[in-house]
Amino acid sequence: MPFLLLIEDDDAIRTALELSLSRQGHRVATAATGEDGLKLLKEQRPDLVVLDVMLPGIDGFEVCRRIRRTDQLPIILLTARSDDIDVVVGLESGADDYVVKPVQGRVLDARIRAVLRRGERESTDSATFGSLVIDRSAMTVTKNGEDLQLTPTELRLLLELSRRPGQALSRQQLLRLVWEHDYLGDSRLVDACVQRLRAKVEDVPSSPTLIRTVRGVGYRLDVPA
Amino acid sequence: MFAGLRFTSLRLRLVVVFALVALTAAVSASGIAYWLNREAVLTRTQDGALNDFRQEMQNRAATLPLRPTEEDLRRTAEQMASGSAGYSVLLLGERDKGKPIIGASNPDTFTLADVPESLRVAVDTERPVREGDTSPYHLFWQRTQRGKTPYLVGGTRIAGGGPTGYMFKSLEAERADLNSLAWSLGIATALALVGSALLAQAAATTVLRPVHRLGEAARRLGEGKLDTRLRVSGTDELADLSRTFNSAAESLQKKVADMSAREESSRRFVADMSHELRTPLTALTAVTEVLEDEQDSLDPMIAPAVALVVSETRRLNDLVENLMEVTRFDAGTARLVLDDVDVADQVTACIDARAWLDAVELDAERGIMARLDPRRLDVILANLIGNALKHGGSPVRVAIRTEDGELVIEVRDHGPGIPEEVLPHVFDRFYKASASRPRSEGSGLGLSIAMENALIHGGSITAANSPDGDGAVFVLRLPQDDEQGEVEES
């Protein structure tokens, strides 16, 4: 049974979401502020965090950044579409996915399960791209022999790209493969995740040699010459 | 300045009027001056010459013997012509009865042939002597022309069988004087014309510069620069006009500011309200599913109430979502999230997601790529197709094609079409095709939101009735390759 931490300041929403998620078969811990949430995170080690953006005290973005300093566990943001900037900032601070309020419990549950699936092992081989070694059996990535700390989403994105080296994948394709989104996936999720992944795997993230942008199409993982 | 000179321009009209006034004044003044001068000059010359001639005739011709010799006549004529008046003389006498003789002072320049016939007749006519007119012969004169030179010819006859004398004076010098006068007057007229044109230009400039400034200011005001003001100088009518313009602009600016402040606050209110509504809606939405799942096991008395709560919560959700979408467009905070997509796939998915596959015929080829916001395309299509299904009924036909770098999606239904008077309003907010139609059929925002979503892409939607009278046609046009690229990373 997945164990979730829900950080949401509004009592009604928190209670309703806790009720809905519990019925979907999750174990839910809740916190009303970012500070409480971070404390709870250390004590209880949940599998995933559902995080409201608008929080009193330290806001959702800051909570997200603080979690990412030490942890790679999946984070789903609860946001409002009216604030487009929210989504961009949220994704830049390390969130894996976001849902727009008001959200149906079923939709949130589907997103949670999709995020959690990204960490599951699928095959047992490994692949090497220059100094980068992707071990699909241990679900680890090493660069020059050093372990890289990747979130499950980053790891899944790298796995999907490495499964088709040299082949460009569109953002919509990646959204289906990695995020399991329908046809209305937000391409900014892909862009933000690629940025974070590049920061970890590229020698010079600003001039990538592994994960290349293909204009008008999407992204491609290149085998270094 | 002259580039904009039209026939009807104020400047040209001023110049023409000034020139006409100057021309009339100059021509009439010159004409009168010329005429008076000419008369004075000619009369003086003529009177001098004729008086002198008469004097000479009496002094010399009358003293000739009754039957003079040709030599006598010639000498006398020469003596008469030698005076200061400068004319030639011709004397006609009779040596014997019926034997006319002629004596000329200057036979090369003046012969009898130069004397007009009418003058000779007049001179030779003997008049009856009456009281107050004691002479049977008078002095007659005529101005004539030989070649191109004007001449004065005069003649008289000595009473009592004396000789007839003719004088012949060239008016060349007078003509030259008068010609030079005419030239001077002509030049003066021309100068007056030029002067008037320059004056007209200056007048036009002093009038037209403020008018031009006023026009420029009015244009800027029209472009929405409401802080446009004119510098007022002087107290003339144009300064008054500038002041009027300034006060009009000021009150306009104030009114617009008032209106936009009011509009802004009402927009803010709607935006804030929809935000506020969302919090309870989020909680409600999260639990409606719980209620929905339990519906079957509920008391049959309570189940319909639960169903109502569930469905109305959804509707409230849609309404608030639409309201927020509209306020985002109004506030200009709506942003495009562009991606390269296969349009046919997107349309198919849109139809599929709403379970419309059976009711919609799709005419599209895969592989038409476009750079657009997939979510906004979905909103547009859902509204257009949903609208077509609701008002036109199935089958709805959706055709996708490209035209000159434009993506064209046509949604055609086979319903009764849109009444002509409704057609211009189909994209208006909260516009209902019929007042009697219940409000519950939709939020009234769908097509307006679809239009806004098309516009933000730099595209458009047009609504029309099918020419064959079979249903309504909505045509969405979007640029295939949107260059705005806001979220494009390099």
Image (cartoon, grey):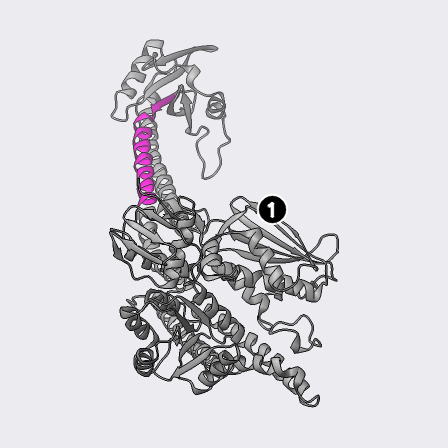
Say which residue appears at 57% left-offset and 79% top-offset: B289
Q: Check disc 1 and report the residue beneath it.
A: B365
Mark 1 falls on what kind of element? loop
- Vertical relation: A20 (above or below) B135: below
- Image spot of residue A7 (x, y percent): 38, 80
Say which residue appears at 34% left-offset and 28% top-offset: B54
> Image check: A158 left or right of B404?
left
Name the image quarter holding residue B101: top left
Q: Nearer the viewer, residue B240 or B351?
A: B351
On the question of residue A81 being in view, the answer is no
- Image spot of residue B441 (x, y percent): 66, 74
Q: Nearer the viewer, residue B186 or B128?
A: B186
> Image check: B76 left or right of A166?
left
Per the picture, the main secondary structure of the magenta-coloured stretch is helix
As for residue B171 lying within the magenta part, the answer is yes
**What type is the residue that disc 1 sits on?**
Glu
Q: Nearer the viewer, residue B32 or B268?
A: B268
Q: Nearer the viewer, residue B327 or A41?
A: A41
State how many labels appear: 1
Q: Chain of mark 1?
A: B
- Image spot of residue B190 (x, y percent): 33, 40
As for residue A111 lying within the magenta part, the answer is no
Which residues, given as a range, are shown in magenta?
A: B166-195
Name the image quarter holding residue A48: bottom left
On the question of residue B213 being in view, the answer is yes
Within 10 Å of the Cα at label 1, are there few (<14), some (14-19), or many (20+) other Cα atoms? few
- Image spot of residue B293 (x, y percent): 61, 80
> Image check: A25 left or right of B312?
left
> Image check: A202 left or right of B117?
left
